[in-house]
């Protein structure tokens, strides 16, 4: 059996001038994800003189971690025959300026999952397994904390775990 390597490509373009110094150049750039027509106009975080109306690389890293957790989890519950009817996440990343080199040090994923009654314990275990299976979580060195909340379709709530 041959090992398979997945390859990912993006195209990035920036045009402008840095001749006016750090405070003067435009941080806006475009990222394309071929082969489709997905194109993002991005900037730096506002603290680094970026456009606050545009997404920044730190947000996209957080979005990738949150999305990967979701997709890993959905694959697991579908294989187990568990009916999940809703999954929402209010994710947050921390990047302290005083911890050199500056980097995202912690990501908190806070999935809120709605399932049929009685599946809570299985769902809780699969959320944790999904975290360990997530390709993005396995690719970054930030601490990733999972704080799920599980609700049943009848409105009852499982205990929140930290």
Image: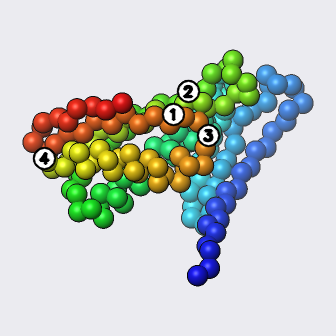
**What is the distance, in whole Å, between disc 4 and disc 3 at their CAs?**
36 Å
Identify the residue at the far right of this view. Answer: 19
Q: Secondary structure at mark 2?
A: strand
Q: Earlier in the sequence, mark 4 or mark 3?
A: 4
Q: Which residue is mark 3?
A: 141
> 4 or 15: nearer the eye?
4
**What is the distance, in whole Å, between disc 2 and disc 4 at their CAs?**
35 Å
Q: Secondary structure at mark 4?
A: loop
| Image marks 2 and 4: residues in contact by CB distance under 8 Å | no
Residue drawn at x 30%, y 38% is 112
Q: Earlier in the sequence, mark 3 or mark 2?
A: 2
Residue drawn at x 14%, y 48% is 118
Q: Secondary structure at mark 3?
A: loop
Residue drawn at x 70%, y 56% is 11
Q: Which residue is mark 4?
A: 117
- In the visual, does 101 lie left or right of 68? right
Color encoding of the figure:
rainbow
């Amino acid at each position: 059996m041959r090992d398979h390597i997945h390859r990912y490509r993006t195209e990035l373009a920036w045009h402008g001038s840095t001749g006016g110094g750090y405070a003067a150049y435009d941080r806006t750039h475009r990222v394309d994800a071929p082969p489709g027509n997905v194109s993002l106009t991005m900037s730096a975080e506002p603290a680094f003189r970026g456009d606050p109306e545009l997404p920044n690389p730190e947000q996209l890293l957080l979005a990738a971690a949150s999305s990967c957790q979701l997709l890993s989890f959905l694959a697991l519950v579908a294989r187990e025959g568990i009916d999940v009817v809703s999954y929402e996440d209010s994710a947050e990343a921390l990047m302290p300026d005083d911890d050199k080199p500056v980097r995202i040090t912690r990501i908190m994923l806070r999935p809120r999952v709605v399932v049929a009654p009685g599946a809570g314990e299985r769902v809780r275990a699969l959320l944790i397994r999904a975290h360990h299976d997530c390709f993005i979580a396995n690719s970054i060195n930030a601490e990733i904390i999972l704080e799920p909340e599980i609700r049943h379709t009848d409105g009852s709530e499982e205990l929140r775990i930290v």
